[in-house]
Image (spheres, rainbow, N blue to C red):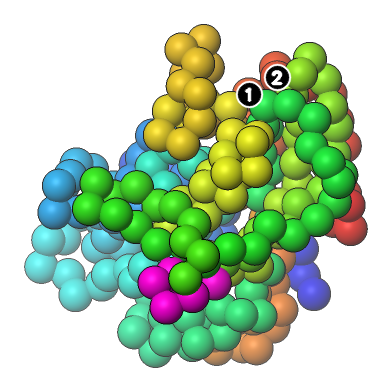
Amino acid sequence: MRTTRQSAPKHQPKGVSLLYEDADILVVDKPCGLLTMGTDRDKSRTVHSSLNDYVRKGNPKSRNRVYIVHRLDRDTSGILLFAKSEQAKIFLQSDWENTTKIYLAAVFGHITPPRGIISSYLTENAAFTVYSTPDPAKGKLSQTAYTVVKEQKGLSLLRIHLLTGRKHQIRVHLSEKGHPVVGDRKYGSGHASYANLALHACSISFTHPVSGTHLRFETQIPSLFTRLVGPFQLSEGE
């Protein structure tokens, strides 16, 4: 496996940090507050539109484009993977079960046990709120593995291995367990003193769609987390 935390390329797309680019894929670090792609309700500037502008190099007639492989919520920061062709996108999505996605989350309270898997069937209501249902026929099986990294000042820092990738999965699972993510105004307590959601996609590991090389990328941890819980160390096996 090749692990990459490299210096940023010289030329950057607007609004995001480009971590890696080759002929087939792009890996970017998305800031909090930016949509991955536009929706029917919100067509503001997105990571997707920024990267399309970037690969077209200012030529609106260019046929170059990027393809969305997966998404992050608007308020979740961190790593996003994009493909440069339909074939690469299909491969990455078909191999998604073998892709490892690691997140950091700061949540309220003391979690017990300190390591576990939250499992439920998630569904969505007409108000676009995701919740767990006891009926497997109405929801999709969703699993979130977590490990407590540090506890301080009434908060717990969690390393999360996302075993499935449902909409709002981490936020809903932790809120329903009684430990909402800091800054989560939709599923949490909505404390005004926390402006940003303390949820960050810190690493991703996957098989390259063309070369077959197993790649791993990670980002710098946002300063929000050290402000919340103080200094900490995060290891791959934690």
- For image coordinates 35% across by 52% down, the residue present is 36
Q: In this orientation, which residue lies closer to the viewer: 198 or 215?
A: 198
- Is 91 displayed left or right of 216 in the figure? left
The residue that label 2 is drawn on is: 228
What is the three-letter code of the residue carrying label 1?
Answer: Leu
Residue 97's tag is none
The answer to whether residue 101 shows anywhere in this view is no
205 lies above or below 108: below
The percent coordinates of residue 139 (x first, y second) are: 43, 69
The residue that label 1 is drawn on is: 224
The percent coordinates of residue 142 (x first, y second) are: 57, 66
Verify CB contact (< 8 Å) between mark 1 and mark 2.
yes
The mark tally for this picture is 2
State which region is magenta: 136-141
Q: In this orientation, which residue lies closer to the viewer: 160 or 57?
A: 160
> Which secondary structure, mark 2?
helix
- For image coordinates 65% across by 43% down, the residue present is 177
- For image coordinates 22% across by 53% down, the residue present is 126
What is the three-letter code of the residue carrying label 2?
Answer: Leu
